[in-house]
Image (tube, rainbow, N blue to C red):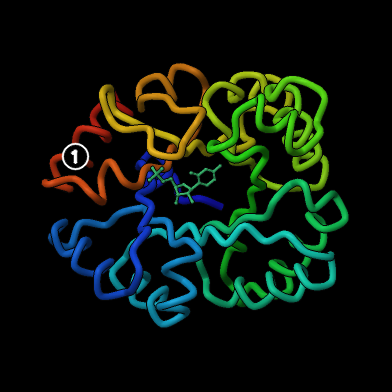
Amino acid sequence: MVNGTFKNLPIIALDFPNGGEAEQFLNNFDGQQLFVKVGMELYYQAGAEFIKALKDNGHMIFLDLKLHDIPNTVHRAMKVLAGLSVDMVNVHAAGGSEMMKAAIHGLEEGTKAGQTRPALIAVTQLTSTSEEQMQREQLINCSIDKSVLHYAMLARDSGLDGVVCSAFEAAAIEKNAGSGFLRVTPGIRMAGNNSNDQKRIVTPSDARDMGSSMIVIGRPVTQAEDPVLSYGKVLTEWER
Ligand SMILES: O=c1ccn([C@@H]2O[C@H](COP(=O)(O)O)[C@@H](O)[C@H]2O)c(=O)[nH]1
């Protein structure tokens, strides 16, 4: 599970094309231990070696590969990912309960003796998806709040530790799934920031007030002129 101290830190999305650029970014923080997220771009380029380097430097790691495949494939892949000793991994809830249960079993089997298995969370509806888009393209004929809550409960009933959701759905998830069930929220923007491709965005303080338990932020920090200053502002607003 997620270590208590780090749990309160905003997660920085290291969306860089290679390990060198990610390291250059991290050097700005002068040895500070951070909670970082490694996504598909960086992992496909820099791989397990880079994860090890992050761990050696004391960072907490959310490996955001969003697995979505048949249960057997996800089970086997999760067994491998557990061997990386990261802190959090994820799947798409749309893969179904059988797939999510297989993911947990894979993580349990792959976790080294004496270590804690990585927390497993499920993506509900991406924060880059609007309600209109979801209804038109996925043919889901209900509100996005309802779809996200449905996926969250499916994930909870499958034994997962939480979900990725926007802040708009966080309170309902907390109410229905319990406060221990993680609500990890990307799509975080400071007032006046560019929303980029995100559709369901909120500020760090709104995320906290609306019931998110953790936040993920990328471009507003990684592409800032002064990333340390920008991260500091996010942290202060999140902690209040
Ligand atoms: O629903 C989701 C799931 C994952 N993400 C990831 O979070 C970051 C957000 O980056 P920003 O630059 O702050 O927009 C990114 O790595 C996504 O892959 C998400 O945004 N929404």
The residue most toward the bottom is 49
In the image: residue 91, left or right of residue 200: right
Q: Position of residue 140 (x, y in %)?
A: 80, 31
Q: Position of residue 71 (x, y in %)?
A: 84, 65
Q: Position of residue 81 (x, y in %)?
A: 60, 72
User: SS class of the residue under badge 1?
Assistant: helix
In the image: residue 225, left or right of residue 54: left
On the image, which quarter does residue 192 sit in?
top left
- Residue count near mark 1 (Cα–Cα under 10 Å), binned few <14, some 14–19, many ≥20: some
Tag 1 residue? 230
Q: Position of residue 73 (x, y in %)?
A: 79, 72
Out of 109 and 195, give the one closest to the viewer: 195
- Residue drawn at x 61%, y 77% is 112
Which quarter of the figure is the C terminus placed in? top left
The residue most toward the front is 136
Is the CB of mark 1 within 8 Å of ligand 1? no
- Residue drawn at x 42%, y 42% is 216
Out of 69 and 237, give the one closest to the viewer: 69
- Residue drawn at x 81%, y 34% is 139
In the image: residue 5, left or right of residue 127: left
- Residue drawn at x 13%, y 58% is 28
The answer to whether residue 52 is above or below residue 183 is below
- The mark tally for this picture is 1
The answer to whether residue 85 is above or below residue 183 is below
Q: The residue under label 1 is which amino acid type?
A: Ser
